[in-house]
Image: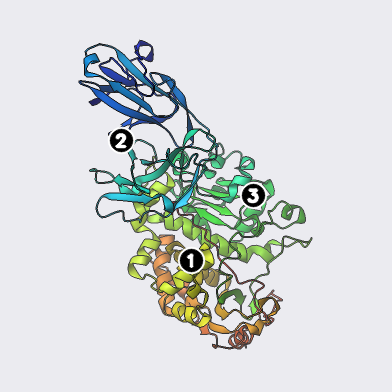
Amino acid sequence: MRIMGNRDAPAGHLQPLLLGLSLAFLLSSCRLLFVVQGDGFVVSASSQAIYRHDAVIEVAGAFSDSFRPVPHPGHSFAGWGALCRNQPVACPVEIPESLVSFDVDGALEPRFLPGYDGPLRHTGGLFYDADGPDNGRLTIPLGELDIEGVGDGDASLQLYLATRELDFLLAGERIGDGFEFNLAEPGLSYNDLWLMVSAVDSEGTLATVGLETETPLTADAASLKAFRPNSPYADVLADCAKVITPFSACEFSELPLLGMENSNPDLEDVMARLVVSHDWMGVRFQQFLQRMPDDMLQMFRGVTAVVISANVRPSFYYPLTGAIHIDPALVWLLNEEKATVSKAPDFRANFGDELDFRYFAEYLEGAFAAFEFFSLDGDRERTVGEAERLFGIVMYHELAHANDFAPPSRMGTLSPSHSMIEAYTANEAFSATAVLEAVSPLRAELVREMAAISFGGVEPTANQKRITAYEVGTAFAGDSAVDFYGHYTGFEDTATLVDQLMSRHHFGIDYLAAFVTRPAFESFASCDDYRVGWGQLGRIGDPAVSARAELVLQVILGRSDVSSYFAGLPSPRTLPVAEGYCTAAGRVLAGASAPQGLRQPYMGRPPERPVKRVPRVLRLYL
């Protein structure tokens, strides 16, 4: 058997000969040709060889095989033509040796349709490490994948690994309850492959899907548009920002990172990359951005687009597209603007409720609240000045993610043919997170477990539910993260270091955080019923923490000297253990001066809800 290209053979010259017997076919031919209509492949059952349009098998002897159609991700199979016309999915082909001498061509003609929107979906799964398998073979248990909509069990289910451009496809071998891939082929890059799931769905349609990463954009994706109609990227901005699978990601030739075009972007450069669901969002975003420090504009080098959409909650960075997505609750000023913002609660708000501790966190300036949280309910309006600090903190956090995935120092190495996620894969070793984890990794396993529960929704065990505020706080204090959320992923470790450093440097804001006991009757608890297990004000000033922040900031800003950001950082102040939260916080804040223009002194009460930083990095590998 030999595969050969035959792109000059017109389909009209094919001479199929069909002698069908139930599921087996007798074909007198010296060549088997593949005429693929639409976007897809054909896979051999015996060899797992992949056949594309105009591929040819030359038959020199008796031949028996079965062929499976494989649509591209987001496509479906519409049936066979020619030789396999009456076959529902797989097409078995048999050629007896006695018929090989006949000079007759046979054709396999699979037809594929775009725009699949059926029940088959692949929404997640934890199935391999970033370093890849040591033995060259990767096993993916089906139990670790989130696959929906497969019909009649999983007999039709097949997994493939493919490059984003689909110029390379590797079929998995079904072994027990999983699939095994041979990754030992020379030149095969483990990190460049993405998982495809192909199956007959619950409606009887054979389709293929890639890993979909859920984003809040799906609810109002149709309303997204470029805020500047005259932007050079107005025609592609919204579509590139709505991508949810790696196989449909835009290349930099379509939508480059801002820093690939301009190493010193200004306000108009940023506005030309803005996507909104409502025009007022763009107007307000510009007003807020005009009041931000200059280094924030520099950090937009790491983004392809900025999206502000009514249903975004919470704000997040999306490494598949290189876009940051901003919750419009940060930028509304008027009641009519507020009315268009989704009031859906953060979907992770109740994670960790069964734990025996709570994590309280507040932003303070002196002894005063650094800013006020404005409700989306009621008719109270606000000014830019009343909301700009929270806007600034969130923006620094998301932009830290963007520059982590696209370090300024690596802009010159990026290829126009790369997508954002491919660019990150190629430059991962140069990211701030990679540098930080190599030099100063977090080691507190207990805190990592608690963070997975509190921010990732992992179900706690009975023993984990009994972990005390003192235990987790002591473990946290012995490590060098600036925030509990930093233990959730290395990316959040990086981003929290940046946002706390920048909020202190630019806005004079300190972060007060504490692990406190959960009272027996929490609904009726007073502030001091929450007893401090560990707490600290201004942890960014701890020498070990600020040293890690310096490592990160050098990469994020693309500067070797960032010493000015650390000048005058005050030492952290630790809350007394076992005291009520408000009493303990009051002791630490006693004597702090009241800043100009703020009228909300610390009132001796805990936050209405412990501040929960939810994950803003959607890792496609998980």
Q: Residues within 10 Å of mark 3 (few under 14, many from 20)?
A: many
Q: Is residue 106 above or below residue 368?
A: above
Q: Is residue 131 left or right of residue 328?
A: left
| Cβ atoms under marks 3 and 2 closer than 8 Å | no
Disc 1 from disc 3: Cα separation: 35 Å
For the point 24% across and 53% down, which residue is it? 135
For the point 36% across and 61% down, which residue is it? 434
Q: Secondary structure at mark 2?
A: loop
Q: Residue furthest right?
A: 379
Which quarter of the figure is the N terminus placed in? Answer: top left
Pick the front one: 490 or 38: 38
Disc 1 from disc 2: Cα separation: 39 Å
Q: Residues within 10 Å of mark 1 (few under 14, many from 20)?
A: some
Residue 428 lies in quadrant? bottom left
Residue tagged by mark 2? 48
Disc 3 from disc 2: Cα separation: 51 Å
Which quarter of the figure is the C terminus placed in? Answer: bottom left
Residue tagged by mark 3? 282
Q: Residue furthest front?
A: 22
Q: Secondary structure at mark 1?
A: helix
Q: Secondary structure at mark 3?
A: helix
Q: Where is residue 504? Give x, y as percent.
A: 54, 72
Q: Where is residue 70? Give x, y as percent.
A: 41, 33
Residue tagged by mark 1? 452
Foreground: disc 1 or disc 3? 1
Q: Is residue 221 left or right of residue 380?
A: left
**Type of the residue with mark 3:** Gly
For the point 43% across and 70% down, which residue is it? 549
**Type of the residue with mark 1:** Ala
